[in-house]
Image: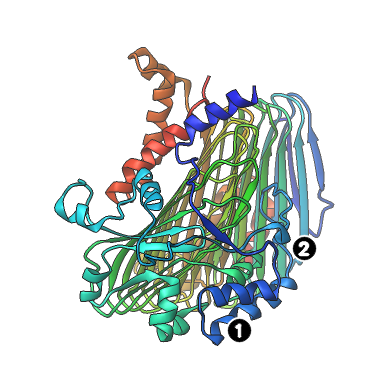
Amino acid sequence: MDRQEVYVIGRDSAPQYLRLDAGEELSMTLVVPPGTDTLYTLEVDLCGPGASLDLAGLYLCPEAGKVDLRVLVRHAVGGCTSRQLFKGIVGGTARAAFDGLIYVAQDAQKTQAFQENHTLLLSDTARVESRPQLEIYADDVQCSHGATTGYLNPDELFYMRSRGIPEAEARRLQMIAFLAPVLRRLPEPLIEEIHACLS
Amino acid sequence: MDELIKDIAAQEYKEGFVTEVAQEYIPKGLNEDIIRLISAKKGEPDWLLEFRLGAFRKWQKMRPPYWGHLRLPRIDFQDIIYWAAPKRAEDRPDEIDPALMETFDKLGIPLREREVLAGVKPKGEVAVDAVFDSVSVTTTFRKSLADKGIIFCSFSEAVREHPDLVRKYLATVVPAGDNYYAALNSAVFSDGSFCYVPKGVKCPMELSSYFRINAAGTGQFERTLIVADEGAQLSYMEGCTAPMRDENQLHAAVVEIIVEKDADVKYSTVQNWYPGDAQGRGGILNLVTKRGICRGSGSHLSWTQVETGSAVTWKYPSTILKGDYSSSEFYSVAMTNNRQQADTGTKMIHLGRGTRSRVVSKGISAGHSENSYRGLVQMGPAADGARNYSQCDSLLIGSRCGAHTFPVIRNQNPHAVVEHEATTSKISEDQLFYCTQRGIAPEDAVALIVGGYAREVLARLPMEFAVEAQKLLSVSLEGAVG
């Protein structure tokens, strides 16, 4: 990847519109740390063949607040690739919403576009909404999206506790494992920071 | 040229004929007097007229929904005849017009009980409620069903003969002001089917309704109410067709299903309204509200739909899972060709504990058509241990069509799991090559591949329907390849 960018929402000025021309490759990671209220919109246009976008994000709202992420990836021409992976942990009285649209224009053949959104819900009073959307006007494409919402697996928790790991630590490990695919894209200090706020 | 196109279109839609039969109409237009007239024609009690008027007043204040991924032609609600019925011969009011019998015969709908019983027709036993424009022509097997305590009749008869039941359940799932088209239906609904299966009774045969639009310039507004009491079981099928016309005709139906404790209802639809011609002229505007409620614990409601017809389809059969451990399924194949547009899907609203739902949607778009899946899965705060799995696949045939997926997942419960996945693809060259290389014509090969793709849903249909649905899919695809 030519460009690897990391933005912490609420701290860095993250771009709201991006345009990738022929052959351009971008890897971008967004982090919404705890205690951030945000409505963040991102629009990406893939305008030249061979452009490639690798987008990931994580949002942590363990206590309160409202996070609303809206991502639009537009494949204007064929032969481009986009991947998205968004992971969220929502607890307390927090509200989190993810709205992601993949748009594939007519004649944008040989497009590959993938999107995933997974959330963990930690409390009775938290709310999660996920709207993964596909709008496709070309036939020779590979597009897919997946979304899940769930909770920390009690079996895993039991496994760790029966081996002497305290409950709080076990939960922390589960959450770190859940976030791992996004965490590994971040610089070390930011990973430390996120680890710290999960405890 | 136009003639030629018409001919080709005629070949593809074999149900597109018109029955020449003396019909009676009420004047065009929609106002309170028209509603009073419809109500009077049907000899309805006051409470029902009040219900209609209430709905009409709500409807006047409402706006049509705009969020669908559809380009709807403007509908002039004053330019529609809201009630049309074949005339009955005055000297023999109880007899069915032979022309009508012939029509349903041609459509393959068995209305003669005797033949079915004597085994003249190889079909299994199916009780049919046949609705022609605004009235029910006949309902078969009523007697043998009544022996078991099952009520299966037209909606108008139910209002006359079982007013308490109708009053108890009407509009409990789809309130009069639910949405624009449901409100319109509540105001002007004509006939439809009513079905009640009492406690612990398993319905011995398939129940079905067949809707036929015949008259020009009319719309069809049927209303169906299905109630399965505790532990009851039934399977219901619905079919529909209309003649070919260059004008759009409106079909705004409401279906309500109430499933009590441990009851099991299976609802299947093969929707084959006239889809319009290749240029997108004419066709039925199918704007339908269907909703069921799993009221008691352990109840089960299953939706299966095959959507091949209609110029525009706007339809979201939904389930409210209120009873603990109730479950629901939604299996759908939506096929669009030429200029057809479909925006269809489901809503699964989980309220009770341990409720389960499964959604399998297969979209197929060809030609210049637009096909969207739109769905909602909601987990309420009390839906502990609830689960949903949704799978929405789209298949594109040709580079001028669109396939879209718009799901919404709303989770308010930390002990509920929702999973959704969707894919979009086309028929691969390899698959086609494999078939053609073995001497299968490209069109047959496509039909074969599409059949395989839709199999999971078609397998859910009752036998008679599955065969028809398979045929419909291949007919609808004609001219889509090459």
Helix or strand or loop: what does disc 1 sit on? helix
The answer to whether residue A43 is seen in the rendering is yes
Q: Position of residue B159 (x, y in %)?
A: 44, 79
Location of residue B206 (image quadrant): bottom left
Mark 2 lies on residue: A38
Count the marks: how many?
2
Residue at the spot 38% in from the left edge and 81% down from the top edge = B161
Colour convention of the picture = rainbow
Quarter of the image for residue B407 reads bottom right
Label 1: chain letter: B
Q: Residue furthest left?
A: B118
Q: Position of residue B296 (x, y in %)?
A: 37, 79
Q: Nearer the viewer, residue A75 or B309?
A: B309
Please tell me how crowded label 2 is: few (under 14), some (14-19), or many (20+) other residues with Cα within 10 Å: some
Residue A147, percent from left and from top: 54, 53
Quadrant location of the N terminus of chain B in the rendered image? top right
Kind of residue sitting beneath label 2: Thr
Indicate the secondary structure of the residue bearing disc 2.
strand
Residue for point 60% across, 35% down: B277
Horizontal placement of B195 versus A90: left or right? left
Q: Few, some or many C-alpha atoms within 10 Å of disc 1 (few <14, some 14-19, many ≥20)? A: some
Horizontal and vertical percent for residue B311? 60, 44
Q: Residue B50, which numbered label?
A: 1
Q: Amino acid at mark 1?
A: Glu
Report the residue that reaches farthest toward the right: A13
Tell me the distance, in whole angstroms, between the alpha carbons under discs 2 and 1. Answer: 49 Å
Residue B86 vertical position relative to residue B155 in the rendered view, above or below: above
